[in-house]
Amino acid sequence: MKLLLGWRSISLLSAAGLCLCSSISTAFTLSLGSGPDVSYFVLESPNLGQRLYEVSYTYNSVTPQDAYFLLEQVLVADPAVSASIVNFGSAASPNYLVTSITFDSVMEQNSSASPFTPFWAHWVADGSAGFPTASPVAAETWTSGSGVSSPYRLIAPGSWDALFYSNGSSVPLTVVPEPSACLIFSIGLLAYGSKRRR
């Protein structure tokens, strides 16, 4: 049997190839925790690249978790990453600040000299301390956060937080869905198109 590829098949194969190529450069993704609800935490720096963590947990609207909870889950689950964190508040009312993150034996720490950059800047998808639902589908959706601790940043299912080692004015890279879904969709379209022609 001779395989003939029409322009539609070639287009679909090209799209599948692009998706496969993009999957090579996708951010590291780690799913962790347990529970029916999910929030997302991104670490980004020249040394780390971009690491996306899907944190599963059980949401409680009476006592919601904060972004520091997400960071704690990340540090426990990912042995490649460690952090130095200072509490500028009290034990009863903490105000945590990440001063350095180490990955692969390379430490990136907040600058102590003027103009005090780079540093670990906190970003959120919707910019509020309340109960976010937005996803960072474009770079413009990231806004500067006001801190990872409650009451400065409470999380809810679907919330996004990031720590980005930068000058504080650059937003984290856009987080995109895993391209493997695009690849599967393209292959499905190709199979469907070839089946219809028979």
Image (spheres, grey):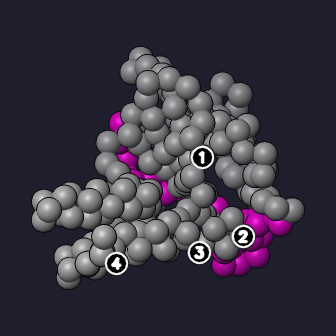
What's the residue at 45%, 35% (across, down)? 38
Sequence-first disc among 1 and 3: 1
Identified at 42% across, 61% down, the residue is 179
Residue at the far left in the pictured view: 197
| Furthest residue toward bottom | 7
Measured in 3D between alpha carbons, the distance from the residue under mark 1 to the one under mark 4, in whole angstroms, is 29 Å
Q: Spatial distance from mark 2 to mark 1, Cα to Cα?
A: 17 Å
Disc 1 residue type (three-letter): Leu
Verify CB contact (< 8 Å) between mark 1 and mark 4. Answer: no
Name the residue that disc number 1 marks.
Answer: 30
Q: CA distance from mark 2 to mark 3?
A: 15 Å
Q: Is 26 part of what is drawn in magenta? A: no
First-in-chain label (4 vs 3): 4
x%, y% of residue 185?
30, 57
Numbered range of the magenta stretch: 106-132
Look at discs 1 and 3 and give the one toward the viewer.
1
Answer whether labels 2 and 3 touch (C-beta < 8 Å): no
Q: Which residue is identified by label 2?
A: 47
Residue that carries the numbered disc 3 in the rendered image: 167
For disc 4, the marked residue is: 14
Amino acid tagged 2: Asn
Q: Is residue 128 magenta?
A: yes
Task: Report the mark closest to the observer, 4 or 3.
Answer: 4
The crowding category of the residue bearing disc 4, from other C-alpha atoms within 10 Å (few below 14, some 14 to 19, many at least 20), is: few
Q: Say if residue 34 shows up in the picture.
A: yes
